[in-house]
Image: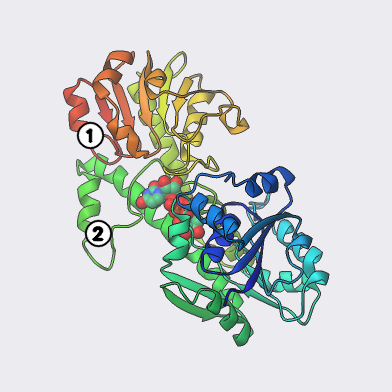
Amino acid sequence: MGQKIAVIGTGYVGLTTGACLSHLGHDVVCADVVPEKVDALNRGEIPILEAGLDELVHTGVAEGRLSFVLGAENAVGDAEFVFLCLPTPQGADGAADLSFIKRAAGHIGPLLEPGTVVINKSTVPVGSAGEVAKKLRRDDVYVVSNPEFLREGTAVNDFLHPDRIVIGSDDGAAAQRVAGLYVDLPGEVLITDPASAETIKYASNAFLATKISFVNAMAAVCEEVGADVTDVVKGMGLDQRIGDRFLVPGPGWGGSCFPKDSHALVRIAENSGYQFGLLRQVIAVNEEQFGRVANKITRLAGGRLQGRTIAVWGLTFKARTDDLRDSPSLNIINRLLEVGATVRAYDPAVVDGSDPRLEGIEVVTDPYEAVTKADVLAVLTEWPEFTELDMAKVGDLIGHKAVVDGRNLLDGAVLKELGFAYDGIGRS
Ligand code: UDX
């Protein structure tokens, strides 16, 4: 039997959560505070690029199990479960800013039915379950932590095929009720206390960021010793204790989670008296990586960028998403702009160059237009379609045949045969 669920916040996490829970047979009402967003969703327009999400939303709405309303107060009235899927942006001191969540909790507290379970899905500092409980001011409702582990671009698949479902609660029965929502999903269910559940989320993201910084640092070593990082990773990954996932070298990690969560964990540790030097260094290696890629571009541009035009393929923080938040590509581009380069960029998911984050960048809608008369082509996002492009044509259009492949996406040998100077990550 489907349960009555309210989801507060229709961003990447909330919309995916609501759509997937309705797909599992629950009755879901999603609330947001932005009227245009709610109207668009009710018309069936999905504001983000997320594989499979359109279909789930359309089916859920058509079958009457999914709807969108303005304001949390219109969603929670008869809900048995309320998912809080609100932003936790990085505050000035690096810690996550809980104000959206606290405000929502204060707002919905008086409206909840006795026995309702309020679930923190957003990534929240350790201790937040208690903070939410305080704001709700109710001793007859439960607060449970149930962190999301959704990758943008594959969020629907990650939701429906989880490696694990983590539920943190001081009340065993409330935890079991939340577990019951996911009863049809595979993956192990781990029930623990709220602080451990909240810590699992931070620890997982910090560990994955550590793997990537490690491999990016190894790539730098490979360049110095003449090794090929692709083979090094293959060799490491065959050791089952290591595995080869999240060991793909690139221009550094970004997105809406890793940067924010790693800084927040450094802060959480510091506030509790532990200096998390390892994680600080993971962040420093990532900054270093942005600089290394910018240096590669400068080198192939002849040592200076003043008056040079750099073509960039890829603006989003990774492929298969239209999300620009904390994109390594934008970080690297801004380093180039600061020293006088002109940047002309193409990204299959970015058609509107008016986003303020793209200020100073000439955004074009054709990859060949981007390279025309450019001094260097830099590939900064791993969109698979870039491998299908005609590099001989690029060679004819570009001013200087030079490619910095920040994702090791293109075939360096083919490019060299075509007369390009080629520089990838961790390979010669
Ligand atoms: C991440 C986590 O994976 C997810 O579990 C969590 O809940 C939210 O944060 P997401 O931000 O969507 O998901 O991106 P992810 O696919 O993890 O990639 C993060 C960054 O690391 C991207 O910039 C990506 O390009 C980079 N990356 C990832 C690498 O450079 N190499 C890799 O091997 C993997």
Quadrant containing the C terminus in the rendered view: top left
Which residue is depicted at the point 81% across and 74% down?
137
Disc 2 residue type (three-letter): Gly
Is 411 left or right of 320, judged from the image as shown? left
- Figure check: 246 above or below 84: above
Disc 1 residue type (three-letter): Asp
- Figure check: 273 above or below 344: below
- Figure check: 217 above or below 305: below
Q: Number of callouts in the render?
A: 2
Of the numbered discs 2 and 1, the one sitting upstream in the chain is 2
Is 40 left or right of 243, judged from the image as shown? right
Which residue is depicted at the point 33% across and 46% down?
249
User: Which coloring applies here?
Assistant: rainbow
What is the spatial separation of the Cα atoms under label 2 and label 1, in whole angstroms? 22 Å
Give the SS element for disc 1: loop
Residue bearing the label numbered 1: 411
Quadrant containing the N terminus in the rendered view: bottom right
**Where is residue 207 shown, x and y percent of the image?**
43, 61
Q: Residues within 10 Å of mark 2 (few under 14, many from 20)?
A: some
Residue bearing the label numbered 2: 237
